[in-house]
Amino acid sequence: MADLYPEDKAGFDVPKAPGHSLLLLNNYMRTDLLSHIHLRLHQMRDANKPGSPLHHLAKSLDQVIGTYDGINLFECVARNPVHIDADYEFQPEQDYLHDIRLMKHHLKCHRRTIKDLARYR
């Protein structure tokens, strides 16, 4: 899998936009925690919550991380059905921790972008 898209850095690339972030998360998250990100995004959109897609994605990531980080519910997760490598060997405990790290990386990048954009207002 490492040679599929080296420019993606296995999902740890710096996302260029909310859509790019979702593409990376969809491709490289290993567990179905991914569905919780999408669920929260749809809830915000359906409730017509204020904020940009970038703000919504950051808030969604923050909520999912806040819910699942540190409690190690790896026995409650399933494999991400849209992972870029269809033959990936699912290892719930390791993959759960990987996904928490990946979500934290994306959240950090989004917070930095939000902060940078706020300087131009």
Image: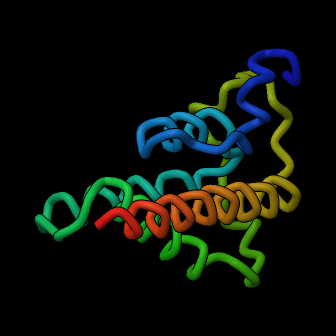
Q: Position of residue 84 (x, y in %)?
A: 67, 25
Side (left or right) of 83 relative to 19: right
Image quadrant in which the N terminus is located:
top right
Residue drawn at point x = 14 percent, y = 60 percent: 46
Above or below: residue 63 compared with residue 60: below
Residue drawn at point x = 26 percent, y = 58 percent: 52
Of residues 17 and 67, the one drawn nearer to the viewer in this rendering: 17
Side (left or right) of 119 relative to 87: left
Quarter residue 42 falls in: bottom left
Image quadrant in which the C terminus is located:
bottom left
Q: Please, which residue is most extreme toward the top here? A: 4
Of residues 70 and 81, the one drawn nearer to the viewer in this rendering: 70
Residue 89, can we see it?
yes
Q: How many marks?
A: 0
Quarter residue 29 falls in: top right
In this picture the colour scheme is rainbow
Residue drawn at point x = 23 percent, y = 66 percent: 51
Side (left or right) of 101 relative to 116: right
Q: Position of residue 65 (x, y in %)?
A: 60, 73
Residue drawn at point x = 48 percent, y = 53 percent: 35
Of residues 14 and 23, the one drawn nearer to the viewer in this rendering: 14
Q: Position of residue 13 (x, y in %)?
A: 70, 40
Q: Position of residue 117 (x, y in %)?
A: 40, 61
Residue 40, can we see it?
no
Of residues 45 and 82, the one drawn nearer to the viewer in this rendering: 45
Above or below: residue 106 compared with residue 121: above
